[in-house]
Amino acid sequence: MSDTVKYLLDESRLPKTWYNINADLPKPMAPVLHPGTQQPVTPDDLAPLFPRAVIEQEMSTEREIEIPEPVREVYRQWRPSPLYRARRLEKALGTPARIYYKYEGVSPTGSHKPNTAIPQAFYNKQEGVKRITTETGAGQWGSSLALAGALFGLEIVVYMVRVSFQQKPYRRAFMETFGAQCIPSPSDTTEAGRAILGKNPDSTGSLGIAISEAVEMAAQRDDTKYALGSVLNHVLLHQTVIGLEAMEQLAMADDYPDMVIGCTGGGSNFAGIVFPFLGEQLRGGRKVDVIAVEPSACPTLTKGRFAYDFGDTAHLTPLTKMHTLGSAFVPPGFHAGGLRYHGMAPQVSHLADLGYIDPRAYNQIECFQAGIQFAKAEGIIPAPEANHAVKGAIDEALKCKESGEAKTILFNLCGHGNFDMQAYTDFLAGKLEELEYDEGEAAMALAGLPSVNA
Ligand SMILES: *Cc1c(COP(=O)(O)O)cnc(C)c1O
C-alpha cells in the first residue's frame, strides 16, 4: 500500500447496520426517569417528542440496527469518509507512533452531525411529521438538521444560543439557505424563553435554555417533533457508522488501534468512533485504551458528578443518570461552542463510571496550539472542538516518543474549522484566555441537582 493512500472504502462497503453498545454493556444502564413521577419513562411518555422508530432505537438492546436504504443513499454522498494516516504530523513530532484520523469534515455541513440528522429527519418524515424543532450552539447541528429538512421536505425551526447567533451570522445564513428558521434563544416565542428574559433581558443564552424552548415548541403541536443532535442513545447509535468504517479501513491497512481518542461535548462523535472498538473489547476481543478529551472550562467527565439530572434548564426533559455539572451551569465563553453542554451522554457516562474511558481536560490555548500544528502538517484546519482530540492524540504520540513504543493511535477529526476562523483570528491575535470553569458556580449548580429516590 502506498504511503499516501487514504484508505477510502468502496462505497458499496458502506455499513448496512449501526452498532448498539447496549447489547454488550457489562452492567445495564440506570433507567431514564419521568420528571414528574420519577418512574422509568415509557415509549408513550416520549411519543410527543420523538417518532416511534427513534424511541425504539433509544430503548433497544439489539446489537445491530439496520440503516434504512434512503439514509444510506444520502450517506453515500460523502461516506465512507476517508481515514488518513498522519504521516507528516508523525514526522513533525518525531514519534514512532502511527497516527490515523477519521475525517468527518467531508460531510456537506463540515462535521459528523449529518450522520444522525439524516436518519432522524427520515424517521420523522416516514411517520408523517411536518415540522422539527431543535437547538444549536455553535450552529453545526442546526445546519445539519436544516440540510436534512431540505432533503426530506420538513420544516425546521432552530433555537440558536443567542451569543452564537450574534457571533456567527454565517451559520444562520447557512441554515436559512436550506430553508430553516433560526431564532436567537432565549426568545419571546416560548414560556421558557420569556421567563429567562424576564429575569435577565440581556441573557446570552445556553444550550440548556435553547433545549427548553425547542422542547416546549414541539410539545405544543401534533405535527411537530423535536430532535437532539447529541447525548441520547439513538444519536450515538447513528454515529457508530464512523467507527465501523474506521475498523474496516484499518483492517485494509493491516492495523488495529491501541488507543482511540475523541473530543466530548455531548459525547456523540466520541461514541461514534469509540463504541465499535469498545464493543469488540466487551465481547472478549482486543483491548483498546479509550481517551475522552473535554475542555477544562466545561469539565463534565473529569469534574462533574455521576447523578440524575435534567437535560435542560427549565426542567422539561426526563431525568437521566449522567456526568453533569448541573443543569444551571453556564460555562465561560470559550471558543469550542460544541463542547459547552452541562451534561454528558448517559452511555458515555456509564462506561466512564465502569472504568472503560480515560477522560482528560485541556484548556483552549493548548488545544488551538495543537490544532495549528496539525493544520501545518496535514493541511486541514480542525474545528475548535476537534482540536481537543488533536491535542489528546499529539500528547499520546509524544509519550510514545519518550518510551519508544510504536503504538497505533486513532482519533476522530469530527469537523473542519472553516466556519470558525474568528476563533483562529482571536487565537493568533493572542486574545484567547486559558479560561477555567468557575468552581463556585459549578458547586451551586450541583447543589441544585434534583433529589431522586431511585
Ligand atoms: C457538535 C459538535 C461537537 C460536540 O458534540 P458531540 O456530541 O460531543 O460530538 C464536537 N465537534 C463538532 C465539530 C461538532 O459539530
Image (cartoon, rainbow, N blue to C red):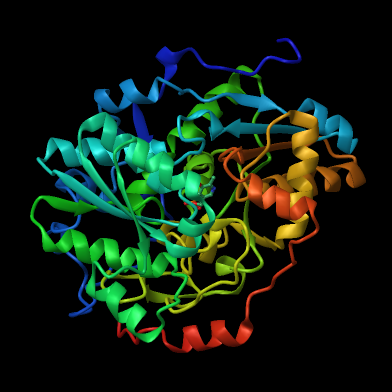
Tell me what residue is drawn at x 20 percent, y 62 percent.
Answer: 217
Question: Height in image: 94 above or below 211?
Answer: above
Using the image, determine if residue 23 lies above or below residue 33.
above
Please report the residue visible at 42 percent of the width from the left and 87 percent of the height from the top.
448
Q: Quadrant of the C terminus?
A: bottom left
Q: Position of residue 446 (x, y in %)?
A: 48, 84
363, above or below 369, in the image: below
Is residue 13 in sight in this rendering? yes
For residue 415, what is the image quadrant?
top right
Q: Where does the image place residue 354, in percent across and percent down from the top left? A: 52, 63
Instruction: Out of 265 and 406, give the one closest to the viewer.
Output: 265
Q: Is residue 347 above or below residue 403?
A: below
Q: Residue 185 vs residue 47: left or right?
A: right
User: 95 left or right of 158?
Assistant: right
Front one among 207 and 180 = 180
Residue 22 coordinates in the image, percent (x, y): 36, 50
Q: Quadrant of the N terminus?
A: top right
x, y percent for residue 361: 67, 63
Can residue 238 be seen at all in this image of the molecule? Answer: no
Q: Nearer the viewer, residue 327 or 273?
A: 327
